[in-house]
C-alpha cells in the first residue's frame, strides 16, 4: 500500500529540502520509507528493482516539490507562518510512534538508549542555536570561474549529506554557508552554471550519506534509531513559530497541527 503514497512522500521530501529548518530525512523516517530511499540513494539495484514503482512516484513527487511547490510553501511560511510551521510539526509528531516501533522491533528498550537519544537531540538543537547567534557568519560566494564551481559543488556535497540525516536541514546548511540565495535563484531561473556543480555535489553527497547511514544501521540499529529519535524531536525546535500565543492564527495553527498529525498516523496505518 505504501507505494501508492510515494508521490505524496516525495512531494513533502522535496519541499523540505528547500525550506531552511525542515529536514527531509525526518519525513523519510516518519513515513516509514527511510531505509528504502537510502538504499536507492546508495544505488542498491536489488532494492530499486523491488520498489521501482514507489521510487518512481517518490522521485516525481520530490522533483515537483522542489520546483513546483517551493514558491507556494515560501509564500505560506511568509503569510501563514504559524499555521504552516505547526502543520509540519504535526506531521513529525504523528510519526514518532512509528519511529519508536522501528527502533524497538528487534531490541527492547535499555537505559543506555537515553545517551544516544540525548546526543541526537543535542546535535540538532545546538545547530539551531548556532545559526540563531550567527556563529557561521554570512559568507558570500562570487560567481567567478573554476573556484565558484568547486565551492558550490563542495557546499552542495555537505548539504546533501544533511539531506539524508533525520533532523538536520540541508537548506539550513546552505544558509550557514551563505549560498542559499544562489541556489534558490538558480532554481527559479534554471541557471545551469550554478545548477551543474550543485547537482554533482548533491548526487555525491546523497550517495555518501546514504552509504554511511545504512552501514551504521546494519551495525548499530538500536543506537542509530535512538539518535534518530532525538534528532527528529529536536527538529521541532527550529520549526516552533514566532508569534505563537493567544490569537486566531495560533488557534488555526493548532488545527493544522492536529491535521498534520492525523495525516501521518493515517499513512502509517495504511502501510
Image (cartoon, rainbow, N blue to C red):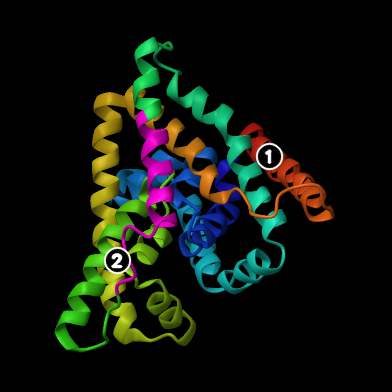
Q: Are marks 1 and 2 in contact (CB under 8 Å)?
A: no
Per the model, the C-alpha gap separating discs 1 and 2 is 31 Å
The single residue placed furthest to the left in the displayed view is: 146
SS category of the residue bearing label 2:
helix
The crowd level at tag 1 (other Cα within 10 Å; few <14, some 14-19, many 20+) is many
Viewer-proximal residue, 185 or 56? Answer: 185
Q: Residue at (34%, 52%) from the top-left corner? A: 162
Q: Position of residue 118 (x, y in %)?
A: 39, 27
Between 12 and 184, the residue placed more toward the observer is 184
Q: Is residue 16 left or right of residue 165?
A: right
Question: In this picture, which residue range is highlighted in magenta?
Answer: 119-139
Q: Nearer the viewer, residue 54 or 196?
A: 196
Lower sequence index among marks 1 and 2: 2
The residue that label 2 is drawn on is: 156
Question: Where is residue 91 shown, x and y percent of the image?
Answer: 62, 44
Residue 48 in view of the camera: no
Image position, residue 259 (x, y; %):
74, 45
Q: Quadrant of the N terminus?
A: top right
Horizontal relation, residue 89 to residue 196: left or right: right
Locate the C terminus by quadrant: top right
Crowd tier of the residue under label 2, counting other residues whose Cα lies within 10 Å: few below 14, some 14–19, many 20 or above: many
In the figure, is residue 193 to the left or right of 235?
left
Amino acid at each position: 500500500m505504501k507505494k501508492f503514497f510515494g508521490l505524496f512522500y516525495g512531494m513533502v521530501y522535496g519541499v523540505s529540502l528547500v525550506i531552511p529548518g525542515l529536514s527531509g530525512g525526518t519525513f523519510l523516517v516518519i513515513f516509514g520509507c527511510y531505509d528504502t530511499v537510502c538504499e536507492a540513494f546508495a544505488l542498491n539495484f536489488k532494492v530499486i528493482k523491488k520498489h521501482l514503482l514507489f521510487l518512481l512516484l517518490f522521485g516525481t513527487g520530490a522533483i515537483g516539490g522542489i520546483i513546483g511547490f517551493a514558491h507556494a510553501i515560501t509564500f505560506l511560511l511568509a503569510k501563514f507562518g504559524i499555521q504552516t510551521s505547526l502543520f509540519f510539526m504535526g506531521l513529525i509528531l504523528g510519526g514518532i510512534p512509528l519511529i519508536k516501533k522501528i527502533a524497538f522491533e528487534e531490541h527492547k528498550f535499555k537505559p543506555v538508549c537515553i545517551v544516544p537519544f540525548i546526543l541526537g537531540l543535542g546535535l540538532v538543537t545546538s545547530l539551531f542555536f548556532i545559526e540563531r547567534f550567527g556563529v557561521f557568519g554570512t559568507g558570500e560566494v562570487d560567481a567567478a570561474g573554476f573556484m565558484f564551481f568547486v565551492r558550490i559543488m563542495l557546499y552542495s556535497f555537505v548539504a546533501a549529506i544533511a539531506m539524508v540525516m533525520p533532523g538536520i536541514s540541508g537548506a539550513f546548511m546552505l544558509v550557514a554557508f551563505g549560498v542559499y540565495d544562489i541556489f534558490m535563484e538558480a532554481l527559479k531561473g534554471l541557471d545551469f552554471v550554478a545548477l551543474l556543480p550543485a547537482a554533482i555535489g548533491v548526487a555525491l553527497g546523497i550517495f555518501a550519506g546514504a552509504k554511511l547511514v545504512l552501514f551504521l544501521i546494519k551495525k548499530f540499529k538500536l543506537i542509530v534509531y535512538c539518535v534518530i529519535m532525538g534528532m527528529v524531536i529536536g527538529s521541532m525546535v527550529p520549526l516552533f513559530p514566532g508569534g505563537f500565543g493567544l490569537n486566531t492564527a495560533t488557534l488555526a495553527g493548532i488545527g493544522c497541527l492536529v491535521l498534520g498529525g492525523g495525516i501521518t498516523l493515517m499513512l502509517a496505518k495504511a502501510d
